[in-house]
Image: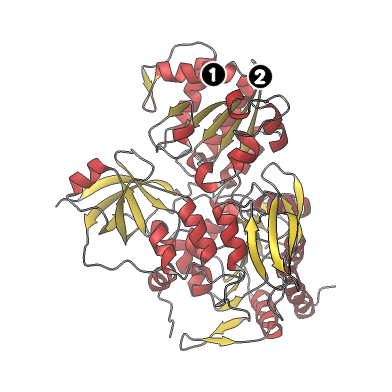
Amino acid sequence: MTKTVTDVICPFCGTLCDDLEVVVSDDGKQLLEVYNACVIGTEKFLHSQAKDRVTRPRLRQADGSWKEISYDEAADYTASMLAKAKKPLMYGWSSTNCEAQSVGNEIAEISKACCDNTAAVCHGTTLIAVQDIGLPTCTLGEVKNRADRVIFWGCNPAHAHPRHMSRYSIFPRGFFTGKGQMSRKMIVVDPRCTDTAKMADVHLQLEQGKDYELLNALRVAFKGEWLPDVVAGIPKEKIREAADMMKSGRFGIIFFGMGVTQSIGKNHNIDEAIAVTKDLNEYTKFSIMPMRGHYNVTGSGEVFAWQFGFPYSVDLTRGFARYNPGDTSSIDLLNRGEVDAMFTIGSDPGAHFPISAVKHIASVPSVCIDPHLTPTSGVSKLHVPVAFNGVETGGNCYRMDNVPIDCRKVVEPPAGMLTDEQFLVMVRDRLKKLKGAA
Amino acid sequence: MANITLNLISGRTIQQGVAIEGGKEKPLYRTACGIIELDHEDFKKLGAWKNSNVKVTSAYGSVVVKAIEATQGPHPGVGFIPMGPWANAIISPNTYSTGMPTFKGTPVTVEVAINEPILLGIELVQKQCGVNVG
């Protein structure tokens, strides 16, 4: 006999779909089927059952081979590495729960570390812009029930957030959007004709890296002022058409992604996108929301901000929290060679940092806490596999609209495997002893 | 055959998402991310068959990937490598004091490299970092 667990949360992207159904064996040890999830979410659940999964910590030997060690030995190694380091970097946190993040922050405080989450290569520039001028935003429920103008700027939810459009933004029938997709106008701004762009009423295929110019041109168009014939590769008539479409809605939302945050201009692009939203509120109701990637990167920002006062790029080396992206941010710290120990959890900088930064990770003592084999585990001295968050352990997470949702445990981890939080508690207790902290 | 110059961007694809959750040590990750998507016109300028191995070089490094026709085109003059170690071997690490590398908008040169192998993801990073893997 099998049993079906309902209302399961998907721990892949920031959409945090909460309607999954997972079939598990009667003893709760095997995960058999996943329903309602996208193809990526399904893969995440099913991969937890892989037969070739690493289930014990492994320490790199002098000859390059791995030696299996116990969790106790792994915690000893990690605590000792952090205790010795002058400027350790504790990076990741976005694929783990808020409880583990909080224990991690205790460790960071004791070891006077720099701590950062995956916003560093994702929506970090958004956070800077929000601190510049604020963020008129809403929840995804409001989008579902009210939004009749939906703009996807530099994001491709058809690929990156596969169920976003069907659950919240385009297709669902909401309270004031009873005709679903027919109730909404969709504008996509992207230099590629993406699968999302192919569905749009208007696709503005701008020249890559000209987001600021186009956002600025929209602000001009809202006011009906003079525009050049072409801005960012888009004819002015099309810009005016898009501007009129935005102004004529009852409730609009701008979702934006890496196309804006990672292109040249960076936080200034977001400044301008938020200013567009502000301007639109002169005519109608408009909101803006970042399309957060990792399922709990938002939660990591929340926990950092709650405990240290800043959402990412926090430097505790002086014994108090400092925040100065460009100085205290992971990529810059690594590229300048300032980090003397690397602690990675719930992310993969080996795959997603520029190679110049990864080379520095490979050159210092390093620990990678991750259920998967990754390029980060491949260059780290110690790899600590843990239970899958959201599959083999529950915990609190934040959706991209800052709504906290508790993840569910649906299946037991392989015998003897620890969760992130359990392992971090072991490290924290050892570190306290080494540092003589209370 | 000629070298061509493109503006490189990286980003997520659904195949990349499936591959990272399915195991980055597996060949599927290379199939999903060890590629560059080019427009038909850019293929003509390059003088290469579709699905040829090509070497992509920027001011920050070079990497061998498979050139495939754009799946979400057209985007003339723009090359797309899904986010991952192959793209990150060549993107600009400059953050301009924002903390964010320039993952989108790196000038690159593409040349045909039929006989050069495309490495697996973990292997590529280990090789670039000089990690002794026994």
Asked which quadrant contains residue A426, the reply is bottom right
CA separation in Å, label 1 and label 2:
11 Å
On the image, the x and y values in percent for residue B118 come to 32, 66
Secondary structure, mark 2, is loop
Q: Position of residue B65 (x, y in %)?
A: 32, 60
In this view of the protein, can residue A138 be seen by the observer?
Answer: yes
In-front residue for pair A419/A208: A419
- Residue drawn where x is 80% and y is 77% of the image: A436
Q: Mark 2 points at which residue?
A: A250
Callout 1: SS = helix
Left or right: A272 in relation to A437: left
For the residue pair A142 and A411, the one nearer the viewer reads as: A411
Instruction: Check the residue under mark 2 and report the chain it is in.
Output: A
Does label 2 lie on the same chain as label 1? yes
- In this rendering, the answer to whether A257 lies above or below A2 is above
Residue pointed to by mark 1: A245
